Amino acid sequence: MTVNIKLPNNISYDIIINKLNSIKFDKKTVIVTNCTISSLHLNYIKKYLDIKNLSIVTLLDGEEYKNMQSIDTILNHCFEHKLNRSSLIIAFGGGVIGDMAGFAASIYQRGIDFIQIPTTLLSQVDASVGGKTGVNNKYGKNLIGAFHQPSAVYIDPFFLSTLPKREFSSGVSEIIKMAITFDKDFFIWLENNILDNEKNIKYAILKSVQIKANVVNTDEKEKGIRAVLNYGHTFAHVIENETNYKTYLHGEAVGIGMLIANNLSIKIGLMNKKEALRVKKLLESYNIPTSYIIKNTETFYEHFFLDKKSLDSKIKFILAKGLGDYTIKDNLKKEDIISVLKDFS
């Protein structure tokens, strides 16, 4: 199964959802991975790589290492191995590795090619598609980065065989996110089909990738509709920052963020309680957290202004409009937002 990204600036690449086949490059290539993926799957991927000049840089595993120090490690490796502008970086891992490898590729000698071989469900359905790259800093998540499209994305469901259940559920959260905002029929399908077999998983990956590809094709640089993919993320990024990226996986924080966003939708009349409960039940069926205690609502509120989606003094909220539709609001009253935050305090 292949989904194509075709952007207005003549950039086009394929997202291939299938077992890996031979990947051949006659150029200097660096695989960027982490210690966990290296021990589990490096030998598997090497069987399919036909690359004469290949080296590997292995980073520590975890969101806390998604920083400029790791970027320096990647760049130093590239310089030491004398990569040039025709060289290639392969991002081999989850969303953290994909974001960092892509960012390093975007700035090495002002930009070289990279490909994505995502190994987690979250990265397969979301992070590997669309060209967003970056790292975190003390002010928030992905505040340093660039748009840099991969040359190709290879999604092999085989890698999910070693994925811990919690990591798998984190990816399911992003699948649910896209169904809620873009495709009610897909949401209903998710309610009635458990992602516990290859057929269902491949279908869910395909549907999610198709949704994201359609959005990216329309709005590469997030000037409009692409912002909708951040449904739940405005709240999730604050939660991740407050917990130092150690308590929740990204998809878990997004799950909580969607529920807070849904409460806001209910408050302003965009969603009814029954629809919000369906979302909560679907998340809970995959053991995705649905509660969070906000210690200080004012501090939580002020963190919104560090989000990339905030415009000057306005906070942009992506909200579900029932199931299968969305709206973007940047004129909500502070008292309404605080009232919803207090529901979680």
Image: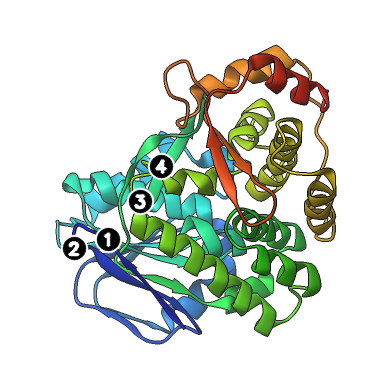
| Residue 221 visible from this viewpoint | yes
**Amino acid carrying mark 3 in the image:** Asp
The residue at which mark 4 appears reads as: 134
Left or right of residue 55: residue 278: right
**Amino acid carrying mark 1 in the image:** Leu
Give the residue displayed 35% in from the left and 56% down from the top: 218
Neighbour tally class for label 4: few under 14, some 14-19, many 20 plus, Cα within 10 Å: many
Calculate the distance from the C-alpha at mark 1 to the C-alpha at mark 3.
9 Å
**Amino acid carrying mark 4 in the image:** Gly
Residue 79, position as x, y percentages in the image: 22, 49
Query: Mark on residue 219?
Result: 3
In this rendering, which labeled residue sits more in front, label 2 or label 3?
3
In this rendering, which labeled residue sits more in front, label 4 or label 3?
3
Q: Residue furthest front?
A: 269
Residue 102, position as x, y percentages in the image: 36, 52
Left or right of residue 138: residue 242: right
- The answer to whether marks 1 and 2 mark residues whose Cβ atoms lie closer than 8 Å is yes
The residue at which mark 2 appears reads as: 10
The residue at which mark 1 appears reads as: 7
